[in-house]
Image: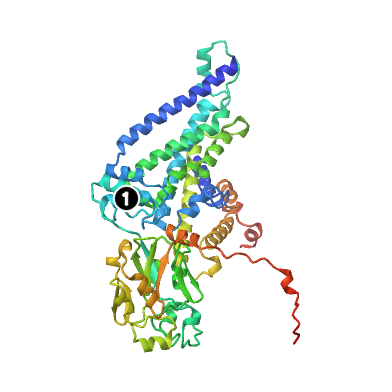
Amino acid sequence: MMDLATMALAGGTMMGLGVAAGWVLGWASRIFHVEVDPRIERVNAVLPGANCGGCGCTGCQLYAEAVVAGRIGPDKCTVGGPSVAQAIAEILGVELGETWPFRPIVHCRAHTGDKLQMGNYSGESTCAAANLVNGVQGCTYGCLGFGDCERACEYDAIHVVDGLATVDYEKCTGCGACARVCPRNIITMVPFKRERMLAVACSNKDFGKDVRAVCKVGCLGCKACSKASGLFIVTDNLARVDYDHYDPEHFVGVDVAIEKCPAQGILYVGKPEKRDLEKLGDIEPPKLVEANFRTTVDRTDWQG
Amino acid sequence: MSYLQSIFITAVTMVLINNMVLHYFVGICPFIGVSRRVDTAFGMGCAVTFVVSIAAALSWLLTYFVLSPGAPLATWLVKLANPAFAGTVNLSVLSYLVYIFVIAATVQLVEMYVRKFFPGLYRAFGVFLPLITTNCLILFVCLEVMKNLSVDAGAPWGLDRTLIHAISSGLGFMLAIVLMAGIRQELDTCDVPAPLRGPAITLITAGILALAFLGFTGVDRNLIKLGEGGPEAVLPKGRVEASP
């Protein structure tokens, strides 16, 4: 009897507390009601809630507020992708233009062995410091390879490999920190219309002879690519890809341009696409050669 | 010892000597998390002080009238149902549940209030405001209330004593977190050795701060003596004799 009464009392106590707290909080939520744009709640509901910061805001809630306030576009959620962008655009009642994620491209392809006229630099080992000094390396446009971009990257997505900054597009979120920190401005942010993009990996604006003197793989400005394909524009002795008219479905003469480039500076960067992997699948793997021990016994008569 | 003196000594003890953060090591999470800037640290100190006062007062009321063995309200309710009942009602098993419930409700209230009247502070707190719910400082004070209300405690605490204790605990937390924020703001301009940057130097600072507060040990005892016997009771014996 007593246990039963205690149990009932315990339950009653908790219930009473619940009712009291509910009443007080309900009253407080009316008194302290804050008028918020209902769209913020709705935008926040369609966001993935990863709070990754890929959009540039601290957390999904702040991104939702910024989107509704119009400070940032509805397509900036990298985790959610196009479907979330579409949902946000519907909530806000705006049209979603076709956009692509921005990714960095390093406009240099000279590894340590390709760089010529290397000086003996023993100063502060940052690109910013080395860029102030003459004669660290012959090319005044190329990657210095001291890794300022590597240190600026929060996502471990860019690394100096054999003296050249190399982007890991699997990890890259396109925040642009590397492009901002590079003292030579050889990293540009490019709209990636495909997972794999064409790039001219050189920034040297000198004449061909001068480029040859400082780099084995630099762009000579020979215009072989722009003659082969309209996608390439040569200005200031430097070829570049016209990303405004980049249409991967209608490439004309690009393969010829890649083949004809004497410096072989036109290359594809980015993640391998499905078809690239399929192309690899078509290649027959080299057959293993079985050892034939009979041939190791020398049966020739001639001995010397 | 007069009532005012006892209030003063409780306050000094809880703020300086038995400081919640630096002596009991409770409430470390916001102490590290929200101590980047002095103004947000002060706001967090205010919020915690408010929550701990309300929660301790409510806990005292609930413990005294409902939860403790033989509590009047609970006994009356059982007698109402069964007039023949002659035992003691003991609902103290519920205490943790009730305390956490009360703390959570208070924090919800504070969150609504801060959101309405201090939007900037609300944004600066971020996740740490709802996390006051799980701030062990507050549960610690509630449990101290329960301990000192029980019959074994000798002189059970009244509501006044509980409130003084809770408010000075909160003020001690505020003092610690504001000191820490001031130090960390200064540290931002210092050249900290690379391996110690970030959390490492923060934890080292917290440790040194706790060591510094260790220097207050014994102040309360001398204050009590000062209240009872005047200055002669506190000064070292030798010095009193040597003076002309």
Residue B232 position in % (x across, y down): 60, 53
Q: Residue A297 appears in which quarter of the rendering? A: bottom right
Asked whether residue A134 appears in the rendered view, the answer is no
Please state if A64 lies on the left or on the right of A294 as rendered.
Answer: left
Please state if B23 lies on the left or on the right of A129 as rendered.
Answer: right
- In this view, A248 is above or below A90: below
Could you say which is closer to the camera, residue B70 or residue B9?
A: B70
Residue B153 position in % (x across, y down): 61, 34
Q: How many marks?
A: 1
Give the amino acid type for the residue marked by disc 1 in the picture.
Answer: Ala
Given the current orientation, which residue lies at the most extreme front position?
Answer: A301
Residue at image position (28%, 56%) is A98
Name the residue tied to disc 1.
A85
Please state if B76 lies on the left or on the right of A291 as rendered.
Answer: left
Q: Quadrant of the C terminus of chain A?
A: bottom right
Residue at image position (51%, 18%) is B76
Please give the chain letter of the residue carrying mark 1. Answer: A
* Mark 1 Cα shell of 10 Å, populated few (<14), some (14-19), many (≥20): many
Residue B141 position in % (x across, y down): 53, 41
